[in-house]
Image (tube, helix red, strand yellow):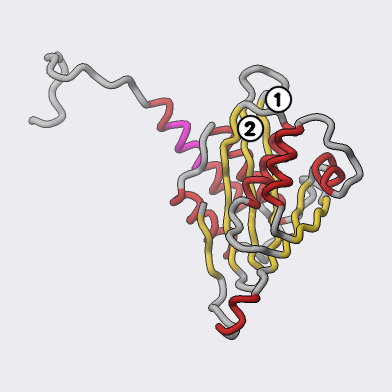
Amino acid sequence: MTNSKIVNDSGPSHAIGTYTPIVSIYADASCLRNGSADRSAGGGAVIVDRNRAELKLLSTYLGPVTNQQAKILACTTALEELRRPCRVEMFSDSRYVVDTMNGKNRMKSNRSFWMQLVQQSYGHHVTWRWVKGHDGFYFQEAADRLARAASATGKDLLPEDLEFLTERLASDRDQLSIRPFEIEIEKIVDRHRAFSSTSVDNPKFGVKAELPSAFSS
């Protein structure tokens, strides 16, 4: 998790005590092998502090939860990043999440997940907005790619990876295509997979081997 300033601070310091940040959150989730025992879910979010023009990215491994549960958790983990009461616009491509949080659906199933989300919403003024997925909405597309990366690798993306991606997203924010950002995430995922595939069990030290030592010529 990291954040990037894209403008300088401004505004009077005496207003800090009563200041309420205006934040937009674009949250999404991905669940590989949904419906099977070995499913793998990830959550992604692009968090925008509108007053400071500041970005923060999340790419969080959510474990073997269902796709619906992952959609809820993606919003929950994003709200957990807010450290003071905010006015929040929460964007999600899940009608299930948006309609439920807007009171159109009852929280019949996944109740423990809903309770986590409701708890994280306390203290904020949250407006829930549905956005069509995979429709070129730049920050929502970025959240989707971040979620896919976490579900594919089975772990949170590293802070240095998120820092790099944040700078890339900030510099590309006026572009219409998500592809340059997507390419960088694909490189990170490939690197994670390559590292995992070359990992071996710890050797038994002190045992002589026939191969030459790496520490001598």
> Residue 37, relative to residue 214: is it above or below?
above
Magenta segment main secondary structure: helix
Is residue 209 rendered magenta in the image?
no
User: What amino acid is at disc 1?
Assistant: Asn
User: Which quadrant of the rendered structure holds the C terminus?
Assistant: top left
Residue placed under numbered mark 1 in the picture: 34
Is residue 189 rendered magenta in the image?
yes
In screen coordinates, is 217 left or right of 111? Answer: left
Residue occupying the far left of the picture: 217
Q: Residue at x 83, y 39 (%)?
A: 96
Front residue (pair 174, 140): 140
Front residue (pair 26, 86): 86
Q: Residues within 10 Å of mark 1 (few under 14, many from 20)?
A: some
SS of the residue at dot 1? loop
Instruction: Give coordinates of residue 102: x percent, y percent.
Output: 86, 49
Q: Measure the C-alpha gap from mark 2 to mark 1.
A: 8 Å
Q: What range is drawn magenta here?
A: 188-194
Q: Residue at x 67, y 31 (%)?
A: 31
Residue occupying the far right of the picture: 104
Q: Are marks 2 and 1 in contact (CB under 8 Å)?
A: yes
SS of the residue at dot 2? strand
Image quadrant assignment for residue 111 = top right
Residue placed under numbered mark 2 in the picture: 41
Front residue (pair 10, 178): 10
Instruction: Give coordinates of residue 114: x percent, y percent.
Output: 74, 39
Instruction: Give coordinates of residue 70: x percent, y percent.
Output: 69, 36
User: What amino acid is at disc 2?
Assistant: Ala
